[in-house]
Image (cartoon, rainbow, N blue to C red):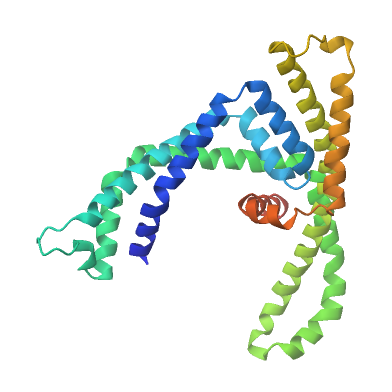
Amino acid sequence: FLGMLAQLVDQIGPYVGQAFTMAYAFYTWLPGHIITAIYGVALCFFGGHFPSAIAALETFRISGGDRVMSCLKDLWTDFQAVRIANAEDNKKDDDGDGVADVDQVSRKELLSRKIGLILRSVNPDRIMTAFGGLAQAFSGVLVILKVQFARTISLAVSISDCLHKPARLLLARPLATLIPPHYHHWIAPMLDLGCKAVAFSVAWFIQRVISATHSAVLGGLLASRHLLKFANERGIFTIDEADTLLDEAAGWGLAAAGLYFQLSHHMQLPTWLAVVLFPFSALETLLQWMVTWSK
C-alpha cells in the first residue's frame, strides 16, 4: 500500500504542482477588479450552496489569511522535497542487479525505509510551525462561524431535541426486532445520530436559502460595481459611479438571476457541477457538521 501511495504521489504530484502554478499565474495576471467581479458572480450563483465555506474564507482573509497562506506554502515546500527524494529513492539500485532496491525489500523494510526518507527530507520545525498555525486559524474560524450561525445551530439543536422522544417511541421497538440482541446497545446512538442528521439537514437548508438571498444581492452589486470601475479605468466608459444607477440595475438583475438559479434547483447543484465541485461540497458539509455539533 505504501509503495502504491508513493507511486501515486509521484504520478499526480507534477500535475498538481503545474495546476497550482498555472492557477496562480492566471490569478496574478487578471486585473484586481476582474477578480473581484468573478468572486461576486460566484457569490450570486453559488453563495447559498457554500455558506459556511464562504464565511470561513472571509474569516481567513480578514483575520490572518497571509499567515495561513504562508503555512500552506511551507507544507507544499516539504511535500515537494519528499516527492523528489522519493522519486530518487525509487530509482536506487545499490547492488547493481538491474532491479530497484524498493522492489526487493519486504513491506516492513519498505515502510521503515520510506518513513526514514520522509524524516530526512522535511524540516521538522517548519512543519510543526505550519501545522500549529493552521490548527490555530481553523480553531478561530470555528469559533467565529459558531457565532455567525448561532441561530442555525440553535434551530438544529431544538429540532433534534424535539425528535428524540418520537424517534424513541416509534422506532426503538421495530429496530429491536430487526437488529440481533447483541447489537441492541447501538440502537440509542443510531436514533440520536438520525435525529441530528434530520435536524442538521432542515436547519441548514433554511440557512442556505437565507444565505442564497444575501449572497446574491451582495455578489451582484460587487460584480457590477467593480466591472464599472474596470471599464472606467480602461476608458471603455466615462461614467461617474456616484451619478449613475447602471451598476445598481446590473447588480440587482444579476442578483435576481443568481437567486432564481439557486431556488429553481432546490438549493442543489446541477449534476455535472456537483461532480466537479464535490471536494468543496464535502468540505462544506464537514464545516457545517463541525460548527453545529462540535463542543
Task: Tell me if 3 is positioned left or right of 138 in this view.
Answer: left
Residue 183 in sight here = yes
Please identify the quarter of the rendering in which residue 228 is found.
top right
Residue 295 in sight here = no
Task: Tell me if 200 is positioned left or right of 61 in this view.
Answer: right
Q: Position of residue 113 (x, y in %)?
A: 24, 59
Q: Position of residue 13 (x, y in %)?
A: 41, 48
Residue under the point 89% across and 25% down: 249
Note whether 121 is above or below 31 in the view shown: below
Q: In this view of the protein, which residue sits in the foreground, 90 or 74?
A: 90
Quarter holding the N terminus? bottom left
Residue with the most extreme front position: 236
Please identify the quarter of the rendering in which residue 245 is found.
top right
Q: Position of residue 92 (x, y in %)?
A: 18, 55
Residue under the point 72% across and 28% down: 37
Number of labels in the image equals 0
Residue under the point 83% across and 63% down: 161
Residue under the point 82% across and 51% down: 154
Q: In this view of the protein, which residue sits in the foreground, 156 or 82?
A: 82
